[in-house]
Amino acid sequence: MSLFKRLATKPTPPAPQPAMELAVAHHQGGRIDEAEAIYRQVLDTDPGNLDALHLLGVVSLQRGKAQEAVDLISQSLAERPNDPNALNHLGEAYRFLGFLDEAKTCFEKALALKEDFFQAYNNLGNVYQAGGRLDMAMSWYQKALEINPEYAEAHTNLANALQESGQCDAAIACYERALDLRPDFAAASFNLGNAYKSLRRYDDAIPRFQKTISLNPALTEAHLALGRCYHELGERDRAMECFRHVASVQPENPEARWALVLTELALVHDDHGAVEDYRNSFARGLHELERWFDADRVKTGFIAVGTQQPFYLAYHEENNREILSQYGRLCRRLAEVWQDEQRLAVRKPKPGKRIRIGLVSAHLSDHSVWHALVKGWCQNVDSARFELHLFSLNKTVDRETEIAESCASRFIQGLVRPQQWAEAILAEPLDILIYPEIGMDPMAAKLANLRLAPVQATTWGHPETSGLPTIDYYISAAAFEPAGAQNNYTEQLIQLPNLGCCYHPLDVVYEDISLADLGIDAGIPLFVCPGTPFKYAPQHDWIYPAIARELGACRFIFFRYPLETLSRRLMQRLEGAFAQAGLAYRDYVVEVPWLSKPQFNSLMRQATGFLDTIGFSGFNTAIQAIECGLPVVTRESRFLRGRLASGVLRRISMTELIAESEQKYVDLGVRLGRDDAFRAVSQERIKQSREVLYDDIAPVRSLEDFCVRVA
């Protein structure tokens, strides 16, 4: 059944009977209470009325009572086995119950009896889609549309399959066609909103979800999706309003309860005091959520895990071990119940010459996690001793994906549901399973809460402890960790040598850009500030006007984030910081569009310095600056996430660019802007020493030793 319990076929009027004609008229008009009453009256006087049995089963199906529907429709078919409409409805009931083989058989029988039965073709497509066979599903939807090109349900289902397979633009076109045919089709409207959201087209997604709600106010999924849009835009209060609405009308909805707690963590903070308030609210919410998931509710809780994650805790310069441990225990409790229900048990690895390493990531493509970490591991691990099994959670395929696949003994991509992924991972018993990041991708978060291998590890694709009881080791790097770093992790900390990765330099390509066209005066000190808005903590805003006060004329170049509402909030906050210092923000800060890599390289080649974000440092951007010969200023933190750029600088023996405090950070920025000789020497030393950053095989050999030891 569809999200709105709308049947793919309307009840077909039976043989002329006054009572039945009236019942069918009510049924087709959507008045199922009246239809049900008459069907039951007919059966009271004529228990063998096959039409009444069949259509009463349809009513049960519409009410979500699928087993009752199976019983009633089966009674009808026992006497009239060649009724294609009844077979079609029985198939829908079986699909609702999850009996896909039985549903498939019913639809195939219906089609054998009625070759142009386009609704049955559509429903057969639904069976294949439910089973994860998107290619087959699309072929049946297209068959339905060949027979009836104006069948809006098939356009929508085809769009759903296209969306699941990563073909968002084609899916959007199909949804729009369905809505052209049926402007009030709430399912198509809702799913079109989801397609826009997946592309971060929030200006399109939000009105579409609002339209869906106007078409069907009871559709809580649309309220949840609208709330998640607002959350991702940093509009916390609006998001909370949506989630509270769902929790009020569906008090047992686990996703709404989950979202209310996770949304306590705002993306961009207006002041430092708010950070502590949000952290406290989140901690209280977790305690309440733990109590809410009682023995009954825990059975449905896994659906919420990963839908929203405490990603933004990492941007608070605090030790998050305790709070993430609490979060991880809750996630695991919900995941363990689901895993037991699905009977997904870890199998003992097969003895063999090679150790089997599994790697699960949504970023086996042109992505910072791949370039920083995973690519060098995959390309350099000893294939004579180790067997790589890569599970690509993202449907993206590019040149880097092809490189990943070429490194793997087994490469899996294109699955959709957690059970499919879990079964695929368990199919070839692994010795160790590694998640390059836990915290960004929803599917990775779900799977990481399951026990799918005897040894499981994560690493610094998201540079923060996972807090999950199912993750045994955290693979970090000696260059990034302070003394006593184990206290920051729930996992056992493993420190690979140097930067912990085998980073291959990117080709530094330049595309000339005009500084004047960007509103930048080339004759003054220019500082590149490349962090995303949520990397800038409000307590550090003062450093920019402090540098400006010392230097006089200078420019801080920020980048307009694709989610412009977040950039606006950061710029408003910086404007306040400059005003408080008695300076005009517009004289010092320029916001430029998001640039391509060659354009960004060109800008860095013309800049004075690179100002790393404090508290949550940059790695890929810092190395990119080093590759362009641009000095990087950083302030070292107590945690891995605030020591990435400083680790790079230590590796090239340029510790003079590492500040011990915010004031020292300001002093370094001023010196770069004022002291031409210091800047020139820094640039020359970068060029002479940066080769040590690249193609370092020692971390890969250390990773291999770790895998041998734990396997």
Image (spheres, helix red, strand yellow):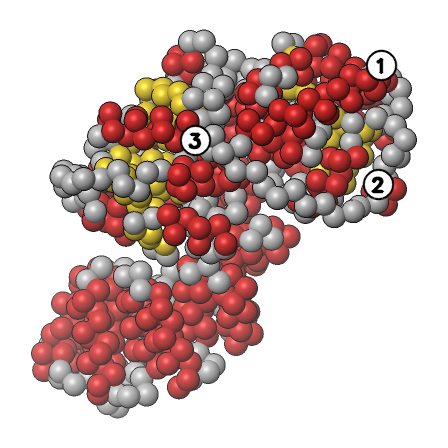
Tell me how far mark 1 sits from mark 3, CA to CA: 44 Å
Q: What crowding class fits label 1: few (fewer than 14 Cα within 10 Å), some (14-19), or many (20 or more)?
A: some
Q: What crowding class fits label 3: few (fewer than 14 Cα within 10 Å), some (14-19), or many (20 or more)?
A: some
Could you tell me residue 674's position as x and y percent?
84, 17
* Amino acid type indicated by mark 3: Ile
Q: Residue at x 51, y 58 (%)?
A: 195
> Is residue 122 at least partly visible in the picture?
yes
> Is residue 86 at least partly visible in the picture?
no
Tell me the SS state at disc 3.
loop
From the viewer's perspective, tell me whether residue 628 is left or right of residue 606.
left
Q: Disc 2, disc 1: CB below 8 Å? A: no
Give the mark, 3 or 2, whose residue is nearer the N terminus: 2
Residue sticking out furthest to the bottom: 16
Name the residue beneath numbered marker 1: 550
Name the residue beneath numbered marker 3: 697
* Label annotation for residue 515: 2
Is 504 above or below relative to 126? above
Tell me how far mark 2 sits from mark 1, CA to CA: 23 Å
